Image (cartoon, rainbow, N blue to C red):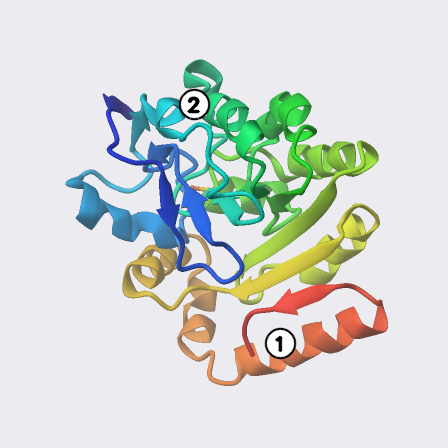
Amino acid sequence: MEIKEIKASSIISKSGIPGADFVINPYVGCSHACIYCYARFMKRFTGHAEPWGTFVDAKINAPELIPKNTDKFKGKSIYISSVTDAYMPIEEKYRLTRRILENLIPLQPNLSIQTKSDLVLRDMDLLKQFKNVEVGFTITTLDESLRNEIEPFASPSINRLNALKQFKAAGFRTFVFIGPIMPYLTKWKDILENTSRYTDHYLIDQLNPYAAVWGSVMAWLRQKYPNMVEDYLNLNNYWSNLGQEIVSYCKKERLNAWVLFG
Ligand code: SF4
């Protein structure tokens, strides 16, 4: 893993993500190295030629870039984080996310944190100081051997599940992002059944059709599940059928879910 310290010129960016006014990414790159990562396009903008998942730049001045004495973010939503995971293992050393949170508390934005790491538990004390906050975990599978293949350096799913339970027990609003669904592999019903008692709402998404994502997933599939390659190349009605199936299941089970495809 190539780790570099860099200085950023700004840290709170306007967001193009539905439901988020602003976004904070304390790092460039992501050591979780998910095979389906959509954020690999960031390589183009950050001058990195290395394979995605093998480099991280720590924006060491990020906490100091949070403005003081402003109402600009009060009532506005800030999402952490969109093109990295703010709780990668490197965060234990740099504590950038933690120090960013400390500096955000006086600004009281509506905060939404999403991660694949149980390291977020470390910051529960700070997160409690936001009046409007939600904590979300991405869970793509509960099968640890599959998780290990597709999200090799993220926390085991069971750790995320336990962290989710702890945030719910502490009174937080929580969400689970089931995504991307890996066709024929993601047991989405199992995830819903195992998380519904601790989750206020769900976001459920399909595998990103972006070319670089697709190339990475297909390379993995050819190696691990060659018999599924044909199925992945013929997903014509798969997403619309699956989307409908998930929507009716969630309706029946009274789950608050936003299915982003189908
Ligand atoms: S955790 Fe998110 S940003 Fe990091 S590699 Fe995985 S999908 Fe990409």
Residue 139 x %, y %: 61, 48
Residue 40 x %, y %: 30, 49
Q: Name the residue under label 2.
A: 96
Q: Does the residue labelled 2 lie within 8 Å of ligand 1?
A: no
- Disc 1 + disc 2, Cβ < 8 Å: no
Q: Residue at x 62, y 50 (%)?
A: 141
Kindly report the distance in space between the C-alpha atoms of the residues bearing marks 1 and 2.
39 Å
Residue 206 x %, y %: 51, 66
* Callout 1 crowding tier (Cα within 10 Å): few <14, some 14–19, many ≥20: some
Q: Residue furthest bottom?
A: 237
Residue 111 x %, y %: 58, 42
Between 202 and 8, the one nearer to me in the picture = 8
- State whether residue 101 appears in this view: yes
Between 193 and 85, the one nearer to me in the picture = 85
**Label 1 amino acid?**
Leu
Q: Which residue is drawn at 23% across and 25% down?
A: 6
Compared to 248, does 132 lie above or below? above
Q: Tag 2 or tag 1, which sits nearer the N-term? A: 2
Foreground mark, 1 or 2, reads: 2
Q: Where ligand 1 lies, by image quadrant?
A: top left
Q: Residue at x 67, y 26 (%)?
A: 124
**Label 2 amino acid?**
Leu
Q: Which residue is drawn at 80% across and 37% down?
A: 171
Name the secondary structure under disc 1: helix
Q: Mark 1 points at which residue?
A: 242
Q: Is residue 228 left or right of residue 64?
A: right
